[in-house]
């Protein structure tokens, strides 16, 4: 028997109403649609004019300059069309006049937005603020204003872009397939390339990511203090009654700190020998994942070995540059992409396996990242076609063989970059359905962001907290005692949220739950 599900699934019906409430499940359009489910009741609660400075005018006039008119939605605006492609009569468009560098967002991408508003109920920051400029539609207007030379990329304008989680839920909801994630990353990279407009905070953040997170030796040295904090017993002490005496800023910081009580995963080379004619795969070990959650890598290796795979971890691989790229460090991301392509090509594998959704989503876009490089563009596309999320890959194999019983009330948190970035929704549920003893309780909005988003919880702490609180309430309403994820950032964020709410519960990667099932199956076979 597989998982007993807390609701039925089916595609959304035509004519379903779109509720703009904070707890409403967003309607799905385009790729990666989330199946409609019945959820268990909660058990607990250009025309030559000079560019204008956006921050030199009152807010209402600023918003009026970039918002659509009151009755603009019924028809196409600004050359946009209800299509993923630019209309044939649109001439070749220039790169953004207000942005610089090879990553400047293209006007053709922006013109696809028809201002329909389907993105609004999918956007966590719009739900939290109710402000148009904190929605995907509003941010696209701002970016287009810079592209067309109508406004300048001032600090105030950039603050609206910076509040974006880049969860890409708007892409799933969009009927015109606007590549919002690409536009946002291009805009950030363009801003970072121009020293005259680059905010100091953005530059500091990019340096931190580039010089600490993406450098294994520096990262390990930094995490040494975290290991001392855990092993000294101070962390356990502050997570007891004594922790209630901490000032709120320190309490929030402490809640975010992971428990570093395991030896980090630093294995490379051949991890599992070839058995028979199984596939040869390579594991992306990444930068943070193996240090904070080594058990996820260990479980991944065991599961792949159980399924007959030969598993290697090329020692030459690098941090793929996800967070630096999201922060606007496009050149750094390209350098790491080249290094990874060379490392994994030399390994001669059938697939590159990734167990961090954010990393996998970015590696699948290496072709676009290197599209302007004549030497590497084709190789990058070829490499990207071999990248597989571990859950996506496992679901294509005979993974039901050898499963044992695991009693668990589970709720699934769809990682943003798995559900929206890669369009993978069915594979995690297929795996949960197959594990005997698992009872799946769906959230009202399982694919809504938890507020992690890399360093977002640090640089946008208030918004991250608000988004997280909504997610914890959603999780609590399911009555589940176990939360399964597919991304280390989600794991850390939800763990912090549950601790802060003083709600018991285990948070782990789905591959770890599958590994437990195989271990139980082995014991059952021996009995």
Image: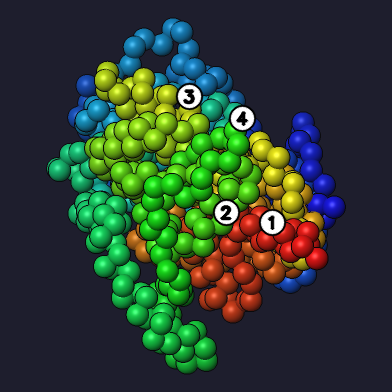
Neighbour class for label 1 at 10 Å: few (<14), some, many (≥20)? Answer: many
Q: Which mark is residue 30?
A: 4
How far apart marks 1 and 4 lie (CA) works out to: 36 Å
Kindly give the residue lying farthest to the right in the view shown.
1
Secondary structure at numbered mark 1: helix
Residue to which mark 2 is pinned: 302
308 and 83: which is toward the camera: 308
How far apart marks 1 and 3 lie (CA) works out to: 47 Å
Coordinates of residue 490 in the picture (x, y in percent): 52, 58
How far apart marks 2 and 1 lie (CA) works out to: 9 Å
* For the residues bearing labels 2 and 1, Cβ distance under 8 angstroms: yes
* For the residues bearing labels 2 and 3, Cβ distance under 8 angstroms: no
Secondary structure at numbered mark 2: helix
At a point 24% along the width and 61% down the height, the residue shown is 218
Q: Which mark is residue 518?
A: 1
Res. 257 in view:
yes
196 and 167: which is toward the camera: 167
Quarter holding residue 277: top right
Q: Which mark is residue 112?
A: 3
Which circle's residue, 2 or 4, is located before the other in the chain?
A: 4
Coordinates of residue 289 in the picture (x, y in percent): 43, 57
In the rendered structure, the answer to whether residue 383 lies left or right of residue 512 reads: left
């Amino acid at each position: 028997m597989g998982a007993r599900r807390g609701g039925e699934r089916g595609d959304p019906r035509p004519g379903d109403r779109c509720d703009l409430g904070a707890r409403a499940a967003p309607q799905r359009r385009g790729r990666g649609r989330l199946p409609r489910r019945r959820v268990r009741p909660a058990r607990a609660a250009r025309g030559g004019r000079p560019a204008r400075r956006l921050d030199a005018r009152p807010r209402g006039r600023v918003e009026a300059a970039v918002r659509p008119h009151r009755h603009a939605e019924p028809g196409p605006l600004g050359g946009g069309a209800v299509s993923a492609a630019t209309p044939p009569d649109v001439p070749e468009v220039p790169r953004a006049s207000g942005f610089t560098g090879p990553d400047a967002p293209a006007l053709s991408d922006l013109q696809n937005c028809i201002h329909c508003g389907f993105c609004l109920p999918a956007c966590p920051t719009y739900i939290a603020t109710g402000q148009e400029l904190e929605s995907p539609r509003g941010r696209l207007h701002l970016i287009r204003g810079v592209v067309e030379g109508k406004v300048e990329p001032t600090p105030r304008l950039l603050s609206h872009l910076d509040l974006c989680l880049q969860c890409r839920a708007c892409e799933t909801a969009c009927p015109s397939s606007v590549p919002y994630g690409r536009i946002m990353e291009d805009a950030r990279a363009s801003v970072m390339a121009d020293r005259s407009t680059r905010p100091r905070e953005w530059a500091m953040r990019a340096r931190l990511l580039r010089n600490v997170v993406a450098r294994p030796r520096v990262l390990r040295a930094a995490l040494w203090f975290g290991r001392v904090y855990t092993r000294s017993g101070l962390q356990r002490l502050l997570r007891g009654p004594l922790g209630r005496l901490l000032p709120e800023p320190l309490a929030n910081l402490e809640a975010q700190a992971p428990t570093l009580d395991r030896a980090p995963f630093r294995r490379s080379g051949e991890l599992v020998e070839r058995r028979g004619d199984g596939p040869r795969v390579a594991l992306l070990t990444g930068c943070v994942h193996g240090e904070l959650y080594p058990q996820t890598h260990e479980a991944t290796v065991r599961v792949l070995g159980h399924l007959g795979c030969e598993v290697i971890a090329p020692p030459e691989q690098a941090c793929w540059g996800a967070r630096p790229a999201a922060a606007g460090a496009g050149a750094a991301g390209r350098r790491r992409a080249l290094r990874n392509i060379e490392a994994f090509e030399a390994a001669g594998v059938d697939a590159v396996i990734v167990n961090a959704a954010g990393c996998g989503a970015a590696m699948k876009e290496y072709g676009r990242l290197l599209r302007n490089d004549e030497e590497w563009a084709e190789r990058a596309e070829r490499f990207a076609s071999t990248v597989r999320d571990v859950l996506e890959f496992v679901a294509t194999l005979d993974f039901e063989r050898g499963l044992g019983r695991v009693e668990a009330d589970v709720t699934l948190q769809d990682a943003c970059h798995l559900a929206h970035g890669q369009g993978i929704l069915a594979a995690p549920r297929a795996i949960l359905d197959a594990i005997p003893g698992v009872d799946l309780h769906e959230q009202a909005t399982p694919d809504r962001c938890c507020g992690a988003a890399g360093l977002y919880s640090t640089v946008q702490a208030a918004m991250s907290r608000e988004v997280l609180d909504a997610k914890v309430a959603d999780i609590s309403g399911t009555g589940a005692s176990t939360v399964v994820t597919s991304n280390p950032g989600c794991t850390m964020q939800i763990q912090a949220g549950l601790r802060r709410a003083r709600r018991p519960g285990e948070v782990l990667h789905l591959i770890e739950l599958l590994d437990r099932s195989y271990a139980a199956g082995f014991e059952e076979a021996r009995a």
